[in-house]
Image (cartoon, helix red, strand yellow):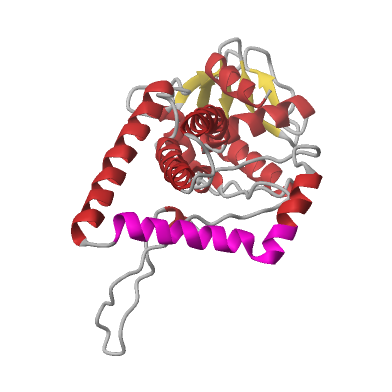
Amino acid sequence: DRAFGDRVGKGRLTSDCTPMESRPPQGNAIVTGESAPDVGESGTARTFTLEIKRGDVDLEQLSYFQSEAKKGTLMNCLLSYTEWIKGCYLHNASATQDLLDDLSSSFEFYRDEYIGKDKQSHGRVPEIVAWLTIGMEYFLDFMFFRGVIELPEKKSVLREFREMLFDLAKGQSSCIEEEKPVVKFIQKLYALLESGQAVVLDRTRPVDYKPLNFIGYEDEQYLCLNADMAHKAVVQLCREQGENFTISKKSLIKALAEEGLLDSDKGKNVKSVTISGRGNVKLLCIIKQRADEIAALSE
């Protein structure tokens, strides 16, 4: 749910329609599934996906922790952690304010640190990295306080965790990029053309007939598309593959222009193109070089 990812509480009213204080979500929701949800660029940016393959989980260790969970060990561990947090940081107003100040400064530091390493990432990825790092840092402090680990091990585990987190975050950024409507449109468009499900004709040659799956023309520089036909073909392909492509034609054209994918007449998003040396037709002219770069993201 996007509201959970945004930390936004559900608006409620009393019986006399007076607004009640909202209660934003607390904690992180952990969801398991066989595949990542198809929730588009925005939804993907609000999740942090971990792919677990066969052999990644040590089943013997898993069985051990499952047996400990039945005994209540993990529950008691979490209780001990929360009691430690309360004892250290929530016992008076001054300590609580110190905690809030530390969380704020740590969040900004870790967020900005990741942005410096991955400037092209979606804005939510550095935030996720910052909060997960802070969570691990506090838990390791608790483990050290309880004498479970020594200081060198604490530093080593945190360093290893951060290296793994950065690698996973870069993968998350790639997943978000592939969910962008422009990226999905170009990749699906290329799939249609390569499979023959859609056809573009050479704009410099005479055309005797147009096949039913015709969506436009091409030359060495451009894919000159009928916007309605191309958009409809991609929407249909996504529907057949069980995916969503809900962006409207108008919004898609705007997004293509913003990404520098279009060559167009001044003040327009379409271009007047000469077909077979005859009349001109206004078409959506996608720059092939830019489109090739985007299509390569899925390889």
Q: What segment carries the magenta color?
A: 67-90
Q: Position of residue 73 (x, y in %)?
A: 63, 60
The answer to which of 145 and 127 lies nearer the viewer is 145
Rendered image quadrant of residue 254? top left
The answer to which of 268 and 21 lies nearer the viewer is 21
Q: Position of residue 216 (x, y in %)?
A: 62, 27
> What residue sits 45% from the left and 30% below the top?
121
Horizontally, is 266 left or right of 212 in the view?
A: left
Determine if the magenta segment contains residue 257.
no
Q: Specify the principal SS of the magenta part.
A: helix
> What residue sits 70% from the left and 42% below the top?
237
Determine if the magenta segment contains residue 69.
yes
Against 18, residue 152 (above or below) is: above
Rendered image quadrant of residue 185? top right
Q: State which quarter of the image contains the C terminus.
A: top right
Q: Position of residue 253 (x, y in %)?
A: 46, 35
- The mark tally for this picture is 0
Q: Would residue 258 be seen by someone viewing this image from the given angle? A: yes
> Which residue in the rendered view is the most extreme toward the top?
220
> What residue sits 42% from the left and 45% below the top?
138
Q: Would residue 281 be seen by someone viewing this image from the given angle? A: no
Horizontally, is 281 left or right of 115 in the view?
A: right
Against 224, residue 54 (above or below) is: below
> What residue sits 72% from the left and 32% below the top?
192
Horizontally, is 183 left or right of 151 in the view?
A: right
Q: Position of residue 152 (x, y in %)?
A: 49, 28
> Which residue in the rendered view is the most extreme toward the bottom?
15
> Which residue in the rendered view is the most extreme toward the left?
94
